[in-house]
Image (cartoon, helix red, strand yellow):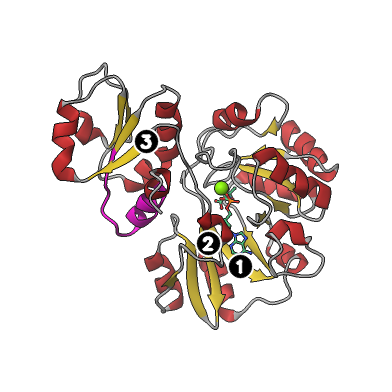
Amino acid sequence: MNDSISTAAQLIRSGELVAFPTETVYGLGADVFNERAIQKIYETKGRPSSNPLIVHIAELSDLSKLTDTVSDREQALITAFWPGPLTLIFPKKKGVPAITSGGLSTVAVRMPAHPMALELIRAAETPIAAPSANRSGKPSATHHAHVRDYFGPELCVLEGGATEHGLESTVVQIKDGVPHIYRLGSITPEDIERALSMKPVFETRSEHSPGTRFKHYSPEATLEIVESERWADLVESANKETGFMAPHELLTGLSSDIPHYDLGPAKDLPGIASHLYSALIALDQKGLKRIYVPAFVEEGLGLALMDRLRRAAGQE
Ligand code: TXA
Ligand code: MG
């Protein structure tokens, strides 16, 4: 085992926080069974205590530490997508501190598909509760440098470079046998439908998923989502107080002294999603008044992409 992982695991065991990479975004983790450590997560992020955390496990056998019941449909989703960017909501076992799930009777669990995250959980010998490693209301960290910028030099950060997906996990609860999607992510509604032969219900603004009610992912600049017919005009009238984040093809007419972030080829939607928060964070550090981003087609991964952009643009 990598030295830094054993040191980080020791910190988790002694009730401290550790930031670590997952395949989605970086997490800010603590031992799920240590209430004081969980309290530190909320304080460090400035997170409202009613916004519950996701618990990360490395083995299926860890699930029985958190819940007593796994239904056939939940099992089908686990088989299809774990380890991977899917969070499932289960009835919470008594021993899981109430503070972990914002006082709810349920607990959110996922098995991340990242070797450093899995090694950390195994070495710490406990499931790790971890929200995204950003200050509350800011874009999630998709690189260890973002985590450093948010929390400074004191925090232990496992450095894994850029994350693969760049959007937080899809959050699903099976209710009365039916999948309800609380948060869109890289695992799309079609993926869920294929795994269960059943259409999911969308509840992405739900009172059942407290996190989706809070303002999210916001840059300081005003983010504006632009329909395609207006794009060329905006590119033409660009000035140094406006920034552009867009697929490569849409930036070709832009003068090189205008702040911009190239999200990669238009065809590569996963690539664009993986750069989304880096783009928001990088452009926001330039102190711009306004950032323009084109609207994406709302199907497949485009649904999650547009969901995050709307939240960042403050459209509820
Ligand atoms: O990809 C991810 O999910 C990342 C990495 C670190 O795993 N984590 C993450 O955590 O995005 P966070 O805390 O930023 O978002 C947790 C989401 C929130 O929308 C919250 O409302 C929802 O999960 N959630 C957590 N527990 C829940 C529960 N018991 N019932 C309903 N929603 C829950
Ligand atoms: Mg978050």
Element under label 1? strand
Upstream in the sequence, badge 3 or badge 1? 1
Q: Is residue 67 magenta?
A: no
Cα distance between the residues tagged 2 and 1: 8 Å
Q: Is residue 130 left or right of residue 230?
A: right
Give coordinates of residue 266: x percent, y percent. Answer: 25, 42
Q: In terms of image quarters, where does ligand 1 lie?
A: bottom right
Instruction: Kindly tell me whether residue 206 is visible in this rendering.
Output: yes
Cα distance between the residues tagged 3 and 1: 34 Å
Give coordinates of residue 195: x percent, y percent. Answer: 45, 72
107, above or below 13, in the image: below
* Label 2 lies in ligand 1 vicinity (Cβ under 8 Å): yes
Give coordinates of residue 175: x percent, y percent. Answer: 55, 78
Foreground: 74 or 245? 245
**Which residue bears the numbered disc 2?**
171
Nearer the observer, disc 3 or disc 1?
3
Circles 2 and 1, Cβ within 8 Å, touching? The answer is yes
Q: Furthest residue to the right?
A: 14
Circle 1: is it few (<14), some (14-19), or many (20+) Cα within 10 Å?
many
**Which residue bears the numbered disc 3?**
222
Q: Residue at x 69, y 24 (%)?
A: 153
Circle 2: is it few (<14), some (14-19), or many (20+) Cα within 10 Å?
many
* Label 1 lies in ligand 1 vicinity (Cβ under 8 Å): yes
Name the residue type under label 1: Ile
Element under label 3? strand
Name the residue type under label 2: Val
Identify the magenta region: 293-308
**Which residue bears the numbered disc 1?**
89
